[in-house]
Amino acid sequence: SATPTTQAARPYGRPVTDATETAPARHDEGATVAAAPGAGTTYLQVAALKRPEAEIEVKILRDHKFPALIGESPKEGFFRVLVGPFKDMQSLARTKSELKSAGFDSIVQK
């Protein structure tokens, strides 16, 4: 279920269990979410799911070497599964294509 693209993506602050050990190297060790997005920061949203399913999806994405994290959703009880952040459209477009090739649909979230 897609969420509106008009609301800013905000990484969720609590740790993601079971997904931290496969976190990409560019995140701090043990970190499960990026810092709050700043101006010009964009994410790709792969899904909006309940917490347990979102954690599983993040682990799967990280197993595929995507920098995935859980973000807040405007819909209560749901969490966004995000990939990023991206600072330029070229890297975003490349990752969107890589996600599609790996079987994941995504939408842009700023």
Image (cartoon, rainbow, N blue to C red):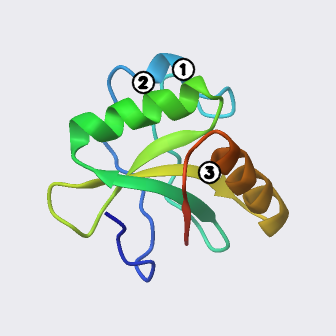
Q: Which mark is residue 84?
A: 3
In the image, residue 26 lies at what x, y percent? Answer: 69, 33
Could you tell me if the residues under marks 2 and 3 are in contact, i.e. CB atoms within 8 Å? Answer: no
Q: Which mark is residue 22?
A: 1
Of residues 47 and 72, the one drawn nearer to the viewer in this rendering: 47
Q: Is residue 49 left or right of residue 71?
A: left
In the image, residue 94 lies at what x, y percent? Answer: 80, 54
The picture quadrant where one finds residue 73 is bottom left
Tag 3: Cα neighbours inside 10 Å, few (<14), some, or many (≥20)? many
Q: Secondary structure at mark 2?
A: loop
Could you tell me if the residues under marks 1 and 2 are in contact, i.e. CB atoms within 8 Å? Answer: yes
Vertical order, 50 against 23 (above or below): below
Give the distance between the C-alpha atoms of the residues marked 2 and 3, in whole angstroms: 16 Å
Under mark 3, the amino acid is Gly
Under mark 1, the amino acid is Thr
Of residues 7 and 26, the one drawn nearer to the viewer in this rendering: 7
Q: Residue at x 35, y 50 (%)?
A: 12
The picture quadrant where one finds residue 23 is top right
Q: Secondary structure at mark 1?
A: helix
Of residues 101 and 43, the one drawn nearer to the viewer in this rendering: 101
Under mark 2, the amino acid is Ala
The residue labelled by disc 2 is 19
In the image, residue 71 lies at what x, y percent? Answer: 38, 53
Q: Is residue 91 left or right of residue 26?
A: right
